[in-house]
C-alpha cells in the first residue's frame, strides 16, 4: 500500500475546517459517491492538489473563503480515469507525446508496462520510460517487466531479466508493481525463475500483475497461489467469472486488437458484487485514441452495454486504485488527490474539463497547459541490428534437398480474421524446385522471423487465415520479442520490405508484388514514432489503408502481424527460434517428417 504524499498535511486540515482559504471550489456539480453508490449535488473544495471537503448540504457555505470558484453548471464531477494496464509503446508514441494524446480524454493516471522496450534494450529502456514519464500533467506509474524474454528458450530478444533486475528497478520513484506475469505455466509449475522474480517483487512491496489465458480449476488456483492478483487476458465466456471467483481483479480490456468488454459484461452482469472488475486499454493505437478516446471510451462502452454510469466510473477509477494499492487515488473525497473530470453527457463521455492535482490541464478536448519537451539520447539510437539477408533466404526450402512432390507442414491457422488465437493444421503441400509452393492457395502465406539483435537466428514457416497479403507486410513491432517479422506471398516483395525496415531503424512496411508501397517509420526502439500524436496517427492511418489495398482487410491490419509473434497467446506462434507450442511451452518442427 502507498499514498501519494501531501505537501503540507497541516494546511490541508485547516482548509478542510475552513480556517484558511482553499485554493479551489467546484460548485453546482452532480457528485458520484463511489463509496456508497449515491448521486447528489455537491460542492468540492480543493487545496494544494488534494480534495479537502465535499459539501452536500450547505452548498454555498464557505465559498467566500476560497481563492477560485468554478461553476460546473450541473456537470458530474468524477475522478480522473485510471488505466489498469497498458503499454505506451503500443500507441507508437513516446511517453510525453502519449500524455498529450490521452489527457484531454480524461486519463490522468496509467499503469504502464514497458515490456516492449525492455525486450529491445533492457534496463536502460525501462529507466528511459520512467524518466520520460516524469514532470507531466498526468501520472505514469511503471511496472517492472517480469518476462524478458516472455518465455526463455522459445524466443530471443535484446535482454534477459532476472530477480536482480527487479531489485534494482524497484528503487525508481514511480515503480509500483511487477508487470504482467505472462509465463503462466512457469508460475503454475513453480519454476525457479518465476518464483525468484515474484519473491523479489514481494520483497520490494510491489503488487503483482497477472496474465493468464484459458486456464481454470486447479491451474488457475495454482497461478493465484503463485502471487499475481490481476488479469487482463479475459476473452472467452466464463473466464471473467472464474477469475473473479478466484479473487483476481479482472481488468476488462478494450484495445485496438482485443475487444473484450461485451463478453466480460455478459459474463458478470448477474453478479451481486463486481468490486474487482477494473478497466484497461492494454494496446491502443494513437489513431484510435484521437478518434475514439482512451479510458473514457472503455467506460462509455461499458455504460452502453448496460452498466450504470456510477459503477462504470468506479471500475475505471477506484477499483484500479485499489488494485494497485494506492489508497488516496481514484475518488473525489477528502484526503484524495484532486484528479477529476467534469462530464456533461455520459453517452459521449467527453470531459468538459480535466484537472490534475487540482489544476486545469485540458478543456473541451484540448490541452491548456504545455508539456515541456525533453531530449533523451536513447530515442535516437538505432536498435535494429539485422545480419545480412539474401533474396534467396525468403524462399521456403524443404529439408533433405527434396526437389518435387509434396511435403507435410505444420501450419498455424487463425480461427478467424480478427482473432489472436491459432490452432495447428498439418497440411500436405506441393514442392517445386526444392521450395514449398503456395501459389495455388491464396489463404496461405509465408512467415519469416529474423532476429534483430545481431544474432543469426531466423525461422521460415507458413500461416493460414492471416488475411490477404498480395505482396508483403513486415514489422519490427512484433510482441513480445520484437524481432523482424514478414508475412508474404512473394519473396521479392518480402526482400523489399526487409530492406526498407533495416534502413529506417524499424517500423511497419508494406509492398505489393512489384513495388514498395509505404513505410511507417518507428525509429525509437523500432516501436515508437519520433513525432507527435497527431502526425503519428495520420501516418498510421495511411499505413492501414495501404495494408488493406493488398488484401489485409481485418479490423486492425496495422497490428495483425503482432499477434503472430505472441508466444504467450495460444496456441501456436513464431519466434526467431522456431514454431512455438504455447500451451506445452516448447518448440515443434515445421516439417514434422522432415
Image (tube, rainbow, N blue to C red):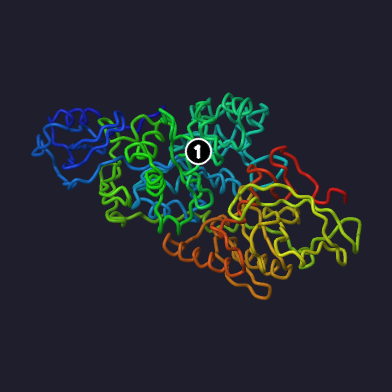
For residue 302, above or below residue 10: below
Classify 10 Å Cα crowding around label 1: few (below 14), some (14-19), many (20 and above).
many
Residue 272: give x, y in percent of width and height. Answer: 41, 28
* Looking at the image, residue 440 lies above or below residue 251: below
Residue 62 appears in which quarter of the rendering? top left
Picture layout, residue 223 above or below residue 436: above
The residue most toward the left is: 64
Residue 288 or residue 263, whichever sits in front = 263
Can you name the residue that lies furthest to the bottom here?
514
Indicate the position of residue 290 as horizontal and vertical percent values: 40, 58
**Position in image of residue 496 (x %, y %):** 68, 70
The residue carrying mark 1 is 143
Q: From what the image shows, is residue 102 above or below residue 221?
A: below
Q: Residue placed at 47% from the left, 62% from the top?
A: 536
Q: Secondary structure at mark 1?
A: strand
Query: In terms of image quadrants, where is residue 30?
Result: top left
Compared across the picture, whether 531 is left or right of 210 comes to left
Residue 559 appears at what percent x and percent y? 57, 56
How many discs appear?
1
Name the side, left or right, on which 568 lies relative to 8: right
Q: Nearer the viewer, residue 452 or 378?
A: 452
The residue sitting at 13% across, 39% down in the picture is 66
Amino acid at each position: 500500500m502507498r499514498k501519494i504524499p501531501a505537501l503540507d498535511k497541516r494546511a490541508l486540515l485547516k482548509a478542510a475546517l475552513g480556517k484558511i482559504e482553499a485554493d479551489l471550489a467546484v460548485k453546482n456539480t452532480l457528485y458520484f459517491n463511489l463509496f456508497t453508490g449515491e448521486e447528489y449535488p455537491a460542492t468540492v473544495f480543493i487545496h494544494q492538489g488534494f480534495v479537502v471537503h465535499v459539501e452536500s448540504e450547505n452548498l454555498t457555505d464557505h465559498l467566500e473563503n476560497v481563492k477560485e470558484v468554478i461553476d460546473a453548471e450541473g456537470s458530474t464531477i468524477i475522478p480522473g480515469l485510471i488505466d489498469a494496464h497498458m503499454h505506451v509503446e503500443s500507441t507508437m508514441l513516446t511517453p510525453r507525446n502519449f500524455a498529450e494524446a490521452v489527457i484531454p480524454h480524461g486519463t490522468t493516471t496509467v499503469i504502464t508496462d514497458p515490456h516492449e522496450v525492455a525486450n529491445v534494450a533492457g534496463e536502460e529502456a525501462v529507466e528511459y520510460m520512467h524518466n520520460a514519464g516524469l514532470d507531466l500533467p498526468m501520472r505514469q506509474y511503471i511496472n517492472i517487466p517480469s518476462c524478458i524474454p516472455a518465455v526463455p528458450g522459445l524466443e530471443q530478444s535484446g535482454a534477459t531479466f532476472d530477480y536482480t533486475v527487479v531489485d534494482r528497478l524497484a528503487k525508481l520513484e514511480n515503480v509500483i508493481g511487477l508487470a504482467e506475469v505472462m509465463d503462466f505455466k512457469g508460475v503454475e509449475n513453480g519454476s525457479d525463475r518465476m518464483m525468484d522474480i515474484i519473491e523479489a517483487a514481494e520483497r520490494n512491496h510491489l503488487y503483482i500483475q497477472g496474465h493468464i489465458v484459458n486456464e481454470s480449476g486447479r491451474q488457475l488456483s495454482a497461478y493465484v497461489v503463485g502471487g499475481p492478483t490481476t488479469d487482463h487476458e479475459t476473452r472467452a465466456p466464463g473466464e471473467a467469472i472464474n477469475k473473479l471467483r478466484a479473487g483476481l481483479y479482472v481488468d476488462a480490456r478494450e484495445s485496438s486488437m482485443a475487444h473484450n468488454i461485451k463478453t466480460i459484461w455478459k459474463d458478470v452482469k448477474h453478479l451481486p458484487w463486481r468490486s474487482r472488475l477494473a478497466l484497461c486499454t492494454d494496446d491502443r493505437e494513437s489513431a484510435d485514441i484521437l478518434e475514439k478516446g482512451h479510458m473514457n471510451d472503455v467506460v462509455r462502452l461499458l455504460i452502453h452495454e448496460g452498466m450504470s454510469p456510477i459503477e462504470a466510473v468506479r471500475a475505471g477509477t477506484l477499483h484500479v486504485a485499489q488494485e494497485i494499492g494506492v489508497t488516496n487515488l481514484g475518488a473525489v473525497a477528502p484526503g484524495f488527490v484532486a484528479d477529476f473530470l467534469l462530464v456533461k453527457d455520459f453517452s459521449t463521455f467527453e470531459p468538459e474539463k480535466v484537472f490534475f492535482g487540482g489544476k486545469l490541464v485540458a478543456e473541451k478536448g484540448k490541452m491548456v497547459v504545455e508539456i515541456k519537451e525533453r531530449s533523451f539520447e536513447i530515442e535516437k539510437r538505432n536498435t535494429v541490428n539485422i545480419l545480412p539477408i539474401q533474396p534467396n533466404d525468403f524462399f521456403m526450402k524443404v529439408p533433405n534437398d527434396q526437389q518435387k512432390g509434396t511435403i507435410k507442414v505444420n501450419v498455424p491457422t487463425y480461427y478467424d480474421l480478427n482473432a489472436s488465437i491459432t490452432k495447428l493444421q498439418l497440411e500436405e503441400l506441393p514442392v517445386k524446385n526444392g521450395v514449398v509452393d503456395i501459389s495455388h492457395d491464396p489463404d496461405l502465406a509465408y512467415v519469416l522471423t529474423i532476429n534483430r539483435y545481431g544474432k543469426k537466428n531466423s525461422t521460415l514457416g507458413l500461416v493460414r487465415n492471416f488475411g490477404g497479403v498480395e505482396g508483403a507486410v513486415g514489422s519490427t513491432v512484433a510482441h513480445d520479442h520484437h524481432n523482424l517479422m514478414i508475412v508474404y506471398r512473394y519473396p521479392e516483395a518480402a526482400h523489399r520490405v526487409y530492406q526498407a525496415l533495416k534502413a529506417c531503424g524499424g517500423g511497419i512496411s508494406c509492398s505489393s508484388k512489384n513495388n514498395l508501397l509505404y513505410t511507417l517509420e518507428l525509429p525509437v526502439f523500432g516501436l515508437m514514432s519520433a513525432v507527435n500524436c497527431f502526425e503519428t496517427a495520420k501516418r498510421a492511418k495511411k499505413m492501414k489503408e495501404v495494408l488493406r489495398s493488398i488484401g489485409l482487410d481485418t479490423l486492425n491490419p496495422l497490428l495483425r502481424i503482432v499477434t503472430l509473434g505472441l508466444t504467450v497467446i495460444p496456441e501456436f506462434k513464431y519466434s526467431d527460434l522456431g514454431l512455438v507450442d504455447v500451451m506445452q511451452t516448447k518448440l515443434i518442427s515445421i516439417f514434422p517428417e522432415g
